[in-house]
Amino acid sequence: MIVDCAIYRDGFRESVTGDVGSALASVRDQPGAFLWVGLHEPAEGEFDEVARELSLHPLAIEDATEGHQRPKIEQHGDSFFVVIKTVAYTRPTSVTLGEIMLFVGADFVITVRHGPANPLAPARARLEEDRKLLSEGPGAVLYTVLDEVVDTYTVVAHELESDLMDLERRIFTRRGGDHTEDIYTVKREVLEFRTAEDPLLPVMQELVKGRIRLCANLSDRFRDVQDHLLRMDQQIDAHNELITNVLTAHLALLGRQQNEDVRKISAWAAILALPTMIAGIYGMNFQHMPELKWPIGYPLALGVMIGACLMLYRRFKRGGWL
């Protein structure tokens, strides 16, 4: 559905009173004016009407309708098509991906949003407050949307970093338990986040180099967004490497803990085996056995058992087995 539609002239917003076609005709009569139509998960017929009025490329229309595209930028005649992945974070450790697709022409911008992440109302409000930036035309819309999305990347990356630090503390707590599943959960979310931000780097390179004519005047602003994205990419690489190291260390700790458990079980088995052997021998009920007629035979056997067990316990304790 159409969530917002407005005309922008000389840095000011004007409401659209008619349909998209009449609004587009009005902005084409004035240099510097443009139409911004925002849609959120539009119905097929609704988007077809907008696409027909603006003569959008059929392949770009198909991508915008179906969604699930990688971040990219494509030139189609006098307009271009941009796909941006959006991210949202919800606890515990869940990264949700969405998409924003922009059709940018000399006098129009169409934004198609899929998923709940990164609503564009804050970006539109921010742009409307900056008349100087707004006067740059449709390219300013693309810059503002990219800047808002990359800022959200920063927030989500910090949340993932917090989860990773918390997981690391729990893992290295003595006898912290098996956290292998938790580690793979965080790693999966980091990799999913990376599928959103990493393919956006080539898109930013195209914009920074000024290869898109409509955005050539905003290269410095796009370079600033690219710098933020590069730092984010390095941070995500560091997170991914740290998770791999944490997993390796965790498996080593689990192996060491299992060895300690086996040693303890073996030590107690050895301690209990000695009195069991003595009791088993004296339980054979042979007639001619030593000490059977001694008055102190029974307490002597018990004493030997206890003394031997204490001696073994002391030896195992010194050796670190207990």
Image: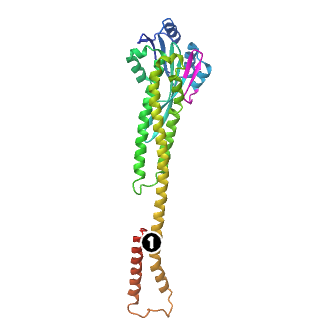
Q: Please state which amino acid type lies under the numbered disc 1.
A: Trp
Magenta residues, start to end: 66-81
Q: Is residue 234 above or below residue 80?
A: below
Q: Residue 221: where, in percent of width, then height?
A: 44, 22
Task: Say which of 35 and 172 sits in front.
Answer: 172
Q: Residue at x 45, y 75 (%)?
A: 272
Q: Residues within 10 Å of mark 1 (few under 14, many from 20)?
A: some
- Between 212 and 11, the one lying in front of the other is 212
Question: How many numbered circles are shown?
Answer: 1
Residue 118, how many percent across, how many down? 45, 28
Provide the secondary structure element on which disc 1 rests. Answer: helix
Q: What sort of colour scheme is used for the picture?
A: rainbow
Q: Residue at x 47, y 41 (%)?
A: 238
Q: Quadrant of residue 121?
A: top left
Residue placed under numbered mark 1 in the picture: 268
* Picture quarter with the C terminus: bottom left
Residue 55 is left or right of residue 232, and the answer is: right
Q: Is residue 3 visible?
A: no
